[in-house]
Amino acid sequence: MPAIVLERVSKRFKKVVLRTGYTTLKTSLVQMFTGRRQPVEYVQALRDVNLSVRRGETLGIIGRNGSGKSTLIRIIAGIYAPDTGRVAAEGRVSALIELGAGFHPEFTGRENIFINGIILGLSKREVSRRFDDIVEFAGLEPFIDSPVRTYSSGMYMRLGFSVAVHVDPTILLVDEVLAVGDEAFVRKCLAKMDEFKQQGKTIVLAGHDLQTVERWCDTAVLLHEGCVAAHGFPSDVIAAYRALMATEEACAV
């Protein structure tokens, strides 16, 4: 049985255009009574994505900025609903998708640990039992009772990753954020992910670090303009990505 299945998943977003001029009251009234409106434009983030991830598999998602990587991660996590298609993820899903996601800036690190743990499906008693391990792994003992708005980006990442891996997820989703951590903590995170691999958990890792994808992932997916352009062994997918980038650079000259 696969851990994650996506069938013909598509997603688009409204394109927000900032007005360069100004609108007068008269213009607004004319538009209101004549029914003339600025046409709505959309950006297609994903197009007919079909993907299956086996239980215990580590999948890397690569592609240039705007290719749909983060949208795909958020759809698997259940943060976005697809416009069309079907998504299924078996088990408890824990996602580290952006710095501070799910944290309330005015609450302390302690309070945010409890809030996020409960949101991810733990009871208050279970969070209490794991609290010390979460704080120790993050290395934030002196700051755990400070508001998280006072945290640096690295501290955000430490706390977010620590909560994500200590809720005992079946599926772990990681989107780009390891790039902001210091080298020692990134090694610590990768060691934890290796532990998850040994336990047979499913990991989806999106980012631009091709070496990490090639070294850690069992399979990889290349997204290009919202479509799956390649899927297979990481070395083959990375080669396809580099060839695509070389072609686009040559055409731009």
Image (cartoon, rainbow, N blue to C red):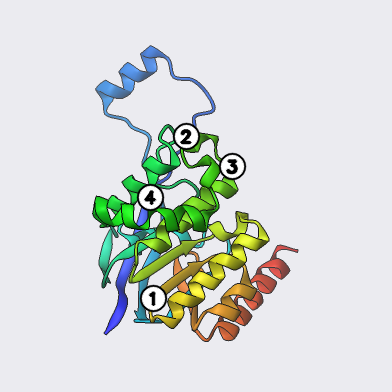
Q: Residue at x 26, y 57 (%)?
A: 122
Residue type, label 4 = Phe
Q: Residue at x 29, y 60 (%)?
A: 82
Q: Label 4: how many residues lie within 10 Å, few (<14), some (14-19) or many (20+)? A: few
According to the picture, the residue beneath numbered tag 1 turns out to be: 202
- For the N terminus, the image quarter is bottom left
Say which label, 1 or 4, has the lower sequence index: 4
Residue 13 badge:
4
Which of label 3 and label 1 is nearer to you? Answer: 3
Q: Residue at x 38, y 81 (%)?
A: 200
Would you identify the image quadrant in which residue 97 lies? bottom left
Q: Position of residue 32 (x, y in %)?
A: 28, 22
Say which label, 2 or 4, has the lower sequence index: 4
Q: Position of residue 4 (x, y in %)?
A: 32, 74
Which of label 2 and label 3 is nearer to you? Answer: 2
Give the side of residue 222 with respect to residue 8, left or right. Answer: right
According to the picture, the residue beneath numbered tag 3 turns out to be: 152
Would you identify the image quadrant in which residue 46 lies? bottom left
Residue 40 badge:
none
Which of label 3 and label 4 is nearer to you? Answer: 3
According to the picture, the residue beneath numbered tag 2 turns out to be: 147
Q: Nearer the viewer, residue 136 or 30?
A: 136
Q: Label 1: how many residues lie within 10 Å, few (<14), some (14-19) or many (20+)? A: many
Answer yes or no: do the residues labelled 3 and 4 have beta carbons within 8 Å? Answer: no
CA gap, disc 3 and disc 1: 29 Å
Q: Secondary structure at mark 4?
A: strand
Relative to 39, residue 139 above or below: below
CA gap, disc 1 and disc 4: 28 Å
Q: Label 2: how many residues lie within 10 Å, few (<14), some (14-19) or many (20+)? A: some
